[in-house]
Image (spheres, rainbow, N blue to C red):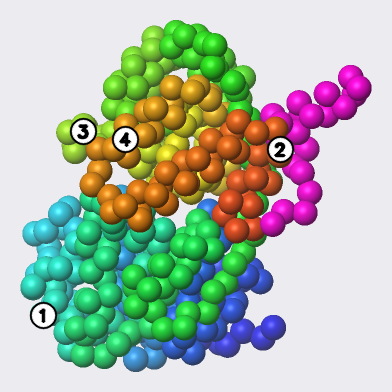
Amino acid sequence: MKIKYEVQDAMESLGISELRKHQIKPINHIQSRDDVLVISPTSSGKSAMFQIPAIVEWHKEQRWVLVIEPTISLMEDQVRALQEKGVPAEALSSHTQHQGKTILERLANHQVALLYATPERLQSPVFQQAVHYNCPWLIVVDEAHCVLDWGHTFRKSYLMIKSFVKNLKRRPVIAAFTATAPPEYRKDIAACLGMKEPKIFLNSLARKNITLLREDCSSLSIKQRLARVNYNIKKYRKGGRVVVYCASRKNVDMVANYLSKKFPGEVVKCHAYMDSDKRQKHEYQFINGTKPIMVASTAFGMGIDARDIRLVIHFNLPLNVIDYYQQIGRAGRDGEKSHAVLLYHPDDITLAHFILDKEQFSEHLRTRLDSRLEELVSIVKGDKCLPRQVLLALGEASGQDCGRCSNCQRNRRSNHED
């Protein structure tokens, strides 16, 4: 397919020599002013699908794009990468508070192609006034599963994006991107964002370089489960980085303390209750490789661009298949062979219900969350191919078993014994 010269110029400015097949249609539809919902795995080039149209439009008309990200770290990583390539991008966050007025002035003077912000920023009267007439031509919602996963709980601002768009002088194109949106999520995401008949693009979510392993720890004590963490790190890290996910702050502290004794000077931790400066320091130490083992609560990893994570361990069961897929997706972003190990214990189901009980969900939402948890438990306790069942839960039918996961290995041994 022949690529327009202005798209080629934008690709060159981003350092992209060739587009992948699944990127072309979303780019074309965004340029044609269609709303789009793109569901594609980590490292599949989702950012380029909106950055290329953004650069093309800015060069032609000096019009700008608003990109909504869930975390400051994700915003800053993308803006830093764009600025290094000479693309005029800015981020509005608590870290740039003293520069906020200057950034908005640059926006008004058509000196910004992409402006990154969290959904909370959209509720600022100052920001609303600044963009009411100088509207973005495109609004991008990255990590769009957060609209539903967080919008109904502690990030209500996600559910206010629709009203923000409605109050603009001109309606922009809306593009939403995520790695995880089961069929029932897609319609809800589109409705929450006020999308108009969005074109939906599905790319295979299979991550064939990641081997999924499940260990039944039902009969193990906490001490023995910790020993399994140690064993798996020694077996699978292979010189790369490691992330250990825990469901509670208490478990993050416990596992981090244990591993610090086994791997002195290599371990950091991250959870929501840590001091912000300390948490950022630990994230930076993990990213730059000085401390390659991270013990973290479930939100960690969104926006962390560490491509050589060789192992993801779940010390506790995640709350649903979407969280599980997102978290194992931190591994092997460079395409190299990696592993994801889930240490299953029945007590984790009780812990998961306790976590859900702490939130004030509507009856409808709570029923859906309970169903999602039960779905993951069924997959983990079952004997069918793990990747195939995970993909099926996410709305993708896989034609054959992977042959590598713990269930496939176990079934193969059983067949040989028979």
3 or 2: tag closer to the N-terminus: 3
**Identity, as a three-letter code, of the amino acid under mark 3:** Tyr
Rendered view: 317 above or below 259: below
Marks 3 and 4, how far apart at CA: 15 Å
Secondary structure state at the residue bearing disc 1: helix
1 or 4: tag closer to the N-terminus: 1
Front residue (pair 287, 380)? 380
Region in magenta: 397-418
Q: Which residue is mark 4?
A: 355
3 or 1: tag closer to the N-terminus: 1
Rendered view: 142 above or below 23: above
Front: mark 3 or 2: 2
**Do the numbered discs 3 and 1 sit on residues whose CB atoms are within 8 Å?**
no
Q: Which residue is mark 1?
A: 129
Q: Please say whether residue 240 is visible from this viewpoint.
A: no
Left or right of 165, for residue 243: right
Q: Which residue is mark 2?
A: 384
Q: Position of residue 82 (x, y in %)?
A: 38, 64
Which residue is drawn at the image coordinates 78% and 38% (left, top)? 403
Left or right of 110, for residue 65: right
Please tell me how crowded label 1 is: few (under 14), some (14-19), or many (20+) other residues with Cα within 10 Å: few
4 or 2: tag closer to the N-terminus: 4
**Identity, as a three-letter code, of the amino acid under mark 1:** Gln
Which residue is drawn at the image coordinates 47% and 83% (left, top)? 197
Q: Which residue is mark 3?
A: 273
Q: Position of residue 362 (x, y in %)?
A: 28, 54
Which residue is drawn at the image coordinates 70% and 32% (left, top)? 383
